[in-house]
Every structure is written in C-alpha cells, then in structure tokens.
Amino acid sequence: MTALLVLEDGRVFEGTPYGAVGETFGEMVFNTGMTGYQETLTDPSYHRQIVAMTAPHIGNTGVNEDDPESGRVWVAGYVVREPSRIPSNWRSTRTLDDYLRDQGVVGIAMRGTRALTRHLRERGAMRAGVFSGPALAPVAELVERVRLSPGMEGADLAKEVSTPEPYIVEARGPRRFKVAAVDLGIKAMTPQRMAERGCEVHVLPASATAADILALEPDGVFFSNGPGDPATADHAVEALRGVLDEGVPFFGICFGNQILGRALDLGTYKLRYGHRGVNQPVQDRRTGKVEISAHNHGFAVRAPLDGPFATPYGRAEVSHVNLNDECVEGLRLLDRPAFSVQYHPEAAAGPHDAAYLFDEFCELMERRRERASGAAGVLDPASERSGATGNTADEIGAQGA
C-alpha cells in the first residue's frame, strides 16, 4: 500500500503507511533526537504538527506505560525512515505501529527523511499532509487541500491541550513549597521534578486568571510549555503580569518563557524551522557553561543580547543563548524573583544538564519565605548584586520586589 507526504510547496514524498491509514494535516517539522520517541509523541507542544524523526531507526524499544508525557498522542502525523520490525525492551507492552494505529495517528515510513529535513532547513517549516488508503487522490488535489489547512502562525492552541480541571501532584516526602502551575501544555515529568524537591504542585487550566493563581497563596508560580503562537496568548500574559505585580517567584519553561517575554513587553517571532530534539547546545551567560538541552519550539523571544534592558518590572537580561543561532534561550528579571528558559530542563527524554533550574526555583521560594519571616533581615539589592555568586536564585531572589 502507498502513502504520500505532501508539502504545501508541492514537494511530494512516497512511502508506505505507518500507524493509522487515512489523512492528516499539520505543520511539518523534524526532531533530531535519537531517543525519546514516546515522549515526543505524547508531548502536548506537538499538537497540530506532523513530526519527522531524523534518527533512521524508530520503534526499537516499543511502547510502555511509564514514559508518556500525557494521556494521549498529540502529534498530528508521524514520519519515520525505517520502523523497527521487532521491539526489544523488557518494559515494552506493544509495538509503536500498533500504538499509533490505536490512537488514530496517520503516519508514513519512507526512505527520504534526510531529503525532507534538508528541504525544511532550506525552505522552513510549512504545512503538510499525509495521505494513505482511501484518502489518496491526484497530487494536485492533495497539494491544494494542504494549502487550505490552517497554519501555525496565529494559532491559539494552549486551551485545546490544557487540563479541563485543576489537580494536585503531591510532594514526595515532606512538603516544602506550594506551587501553582499553569498548564499550557504541561509534560507529566515537569510537576514530578518539582514534587521530587518537596513541592506540592497545584496544576491549573490555561484559563486560570491571576486571581485564581494568587488565591492558592502559592510560594511560587510556574508556566509550562505548550503549543501555538505566543502572540495569541493574551490571557496568559495578563495572568502572569498579575503574578509579577505581587512579587511571587516565577519560573517558566518554553511557552512559559515566551509568555514572560511578552509580559515584559518583548516581541516574539517564528523561527525558520524551530528547535526540536535533545541535543541543542545552550550557554549560560553568567558562567559560560554550555548545557546540552532538550527543545521543542517553533517561536522565540526577541530581546537585546548586549546587557540588561528596561522592562515594566525593572531590569532584565538574557540569561541563556543557543550557540547554533544565538536564539534567546532564557530570561531573568534582576529586580524581581522571576526567570524562564526556552528549553526543557525536565529532560524527558533528554540530557539532565539543566535539572539545576528546578533547584534554583526552590531557592527563590525559600529566599522569599525567609524575607517574609524576617529571618534573612533587610537586604540591600545593590550590595547583594555586588556580591553575586552567579547563581540565579541568589542573585534574583535577593532582589525580589
């Protein structure tokens, strides 16, 4: 049986069906990770995207019940080069092919994934469709149907993937902090990383207002990753501004980084083909250290790279940059306890170089608690900055509003 991958610029790739048979539409992107395909499939940030894996052999370890990042597959379609015929892993419960078929995900196995990746790098991410079985039709007709499908710019998708009702992830061991986490497309591992550090995480829908968040009296607030164009996320921006006004410690990841950027009156823009994988080099500008990090984003924040800049909430600076293209990978406020990164320190799946960021969030919350109780005394922000150790929590936390 034949399957076709059709791009909006008319490029066509032929292969065989993988997963469900039928048709699907979405933004065509590629992921450079050699592992973590199950986490990729279930990451809500991939909502309405067709994902091509650049690693040649996919499905080797099958599918298990432990690694999903959400309760379903979110990718719109899936493209692989050579599917594994026999999964081999002691945790495997079924094949990836069966998993995709059960979830109704239309995919294609084809020899041209390398050519597809080069095409997207040269032309940029674009709309695409995968067609097989009764959905096949003359190519000209399929191209026209792809061109009529919605694009990613201007797409407001966070509410489509967010939890409909609040829920709580209990702290592991004694509870140290209460965190209000706004689910814009949260991955399951993220609240787990906080729970491991003694955080009781109250996960709220994307529709949560500043009043909803602050009503929990949280020690800190977290905004998650998620899909869509950050330029459409006005509701989340207003909610975050309410949090910043109160001086509650804030940590954002991926979409949350873009929301912080917008809250600081910075612009966002669409990357040519985005960053997706587990091998992106990011430099911490405070220390010069390079972290290998996990990414999944097609938009980025536009901010000055040459030192602190003014915002409605005091001074801010770019804390991390991508060494491949100098894309902004992190922001931090210097006069309030807030910071964010564009990448995924929860590392599911991926490297653990950035796990320290969860510790820094906890340090921000601890420092604010000490100030509130008077245990830390009255701190002079100027003197605290002059003695900064290069640690985000020490430096930002001591300068909280």
Image (tube, rainbow, N blue to C red):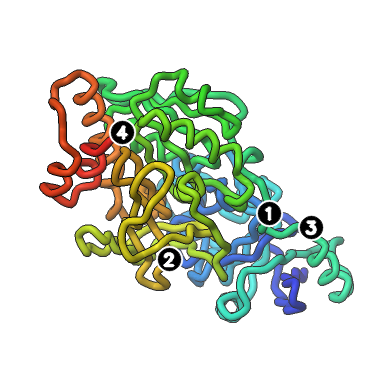
Indicate the amino acid at tag 3.
Gly
- Mark 4 vs mark 1: in front: 4
Residue 25 percent location from the top left of the image: 74, 59
Q: Give, as a three-letter code, the residue at label 4.
A: Ala
Local crowd size for mark 2, using a 10 Å CA cut-off: few (<14), some (14–19), many (≥20): many
Q: Residue beneath label 2, please?
A: 327
Quarter assignment of residue 141 = bottom right
Distance, label 4 to label 1, CA atoms, is: 34 Å
Q: Earlier in the sequence, mark 4 or mark 2?
A: 2
Q: Do the residues labelled 4 and 1 touch (CB within 8 Å)?
A: no
SS class of the residue under badge 3? Answer: loop
Task: Please tell me whether residue 113 is drawn above or below residue 399 in the rendered image.
Answer: below
4 or 2: mark nearer the eye:
4
Image coords of residue 24 (percent x, y): 75, 57
Point 66% across, 58% down: residue: 153
Amino acid type for the residue under numbered disc 1: Gly
Q: Residues under labels 2 and 3: Cα distance?
A: 37 Å
- The answer for how far apart the CA atoms under marks 4 and 2 are is 28 Å
CB within 8 Å, label 3 to label 1 = no
Q: Can residue 98 be seen in this view?
A: no
Residue 209 seen in render:
yes
Q: Closer to the camera, 115 or 203? A: 203
Which amino acid type corresponds to the residue marked 2 in the rendered image? Cys
Q: Mark 1 points at which residue?
A: 154
First in sequence: mark 4 or mark 1?
Answer: 1
In the picture of the structure, the residue carrying the numbered disc 3 is 22
Question: Tag 4: Cα neighbours inside 10 Å, few (<14), some, or many (≥20)?
Answer: some
Labels 3, 4: front one: 4
Point out the frontmost of discs 2 and 3.
2
Mark toward the start of the polypeptide (1 vs 2): 1
* Residue that numbered label 4 is attached to: 401
Residue at disc 1, secondary structure: loop
